[in-house]
Image: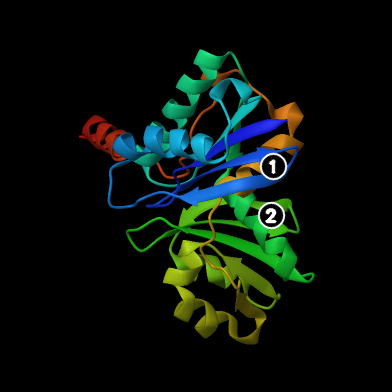
Amino acid sequence: MVVLALDTTTPAGSCALAIDGVVVREEASDASLPPATRLPVDLMNLLEHTSTKLADVHAFAVATGPGSFTGLRIGIATMQGLAFAAGKPLVGVSALDALARIAMTEAAGDRIATWVDAWRGEVYAALYDAEREIEAPVVANPEIVLNSLRGTPTLFIGDGARTYRDDIFRMMGEKGRSADIPVPLLAGTIATLANAGTDAYSPPHAIRPLYVRRTDAELARDARAAE
């Protein structure tokens, strides 16, 4: 099975091609270019570099979040368009699930805390026991999240773990450690997760972003309604 995957949850993002669960090629995007400009070119270049035709792709996969509202919308819309045009399924994969899968090789029995930088002094965070999610995604101040994690060995991964590394070690001490690659590319792992999770296949229009945080437009609407 050939899976073409895209991640736009980080400023750069990445795309990847996997065949039968093995990543053939994974490429980072150019963060200096806006997503709407770079994504189609990145995907077509990836197919060219792997001598793959779009018609050869059996399924598409995309990171559903959390991350930038704009990046998620453009990424999902891009893959929905390709899946619709090809008449193939689209698989949505949480970036936090992908981070947990990557961290498993280092976890050695520790819990895995997946942290994505949510800006505004917050992180998108979830907690895993191996690949099993044991605490659902939240968006919160890092210290609030760390208070709930104290006392149990925990491996942290993600750009949020890199941003708040000092806070992690200050509050967790020897119980907290950082993954060797705190900010890995995710598209390859998303492709392999999509290949394994055939039950998760959905029609393209059914894929929805995992925002976690409410959008500014929603907050402004509620504020107006409360006046």
Tell me residue 90's x, y (percent): 59, 25
| Callouts 2 and 1 close, C-beta under 8 Å | yes
| Residue furthest out toward the front | 51
Residue 211 is at least partly visible in this image: yes
Numbered circle sitting on residue 160: none
Q: Which of 58 and 53 lies nearest the eye of the viewer? A: 53
Tell me residue 4's x, y (percent): 58, 34
Tell me residue 157's x, y (percent): 57, 65
Specify few, some or many for label 1: CA neighbours under 10 Å numbering under 14, 14-19, or 20 or more: many
Q: Is residue 105 above or below residue 34?
A: below
Residue 136 is at least partly visible in this image: no
**Location of residue 206 by image quarter:** top right
Residue drawn at x 38%, y 45% is: 68
Q: Quadrant of the C terminus?
A: top left
Q: Which residue is mark 2?
A: 101
Task: Tell me the SS state at disc 1.
Answer: helix
Q: Which of 224 and 91 lies nearest the eye of the viewer? A: 91
Residue drawn at x 75%, y 59% is: 129
Numbered circle sitting on residue 193: 1
Q: Which of 195 and 135 lies nearest the eye of the viewer? A: 195
The amino acid type, in three-letter code, at marker 1 is Leu
Q: CA distance from mark 2 to mark 1?
A: 9 Å
Instruction: Determine whether, in the image, residue 75 is placed left or right of residue 3.
Output: left
**Location of residue 178 by image quarter:** bottom right
The amino acid type, in three-letter code, at marker 2 is Arg
Tell me residue 30's x, y (percent): 35, 51
Residue drawn at x 58%, y 13% is: 87
Task: Tell me the SS state at disc 2.
Answer: helix
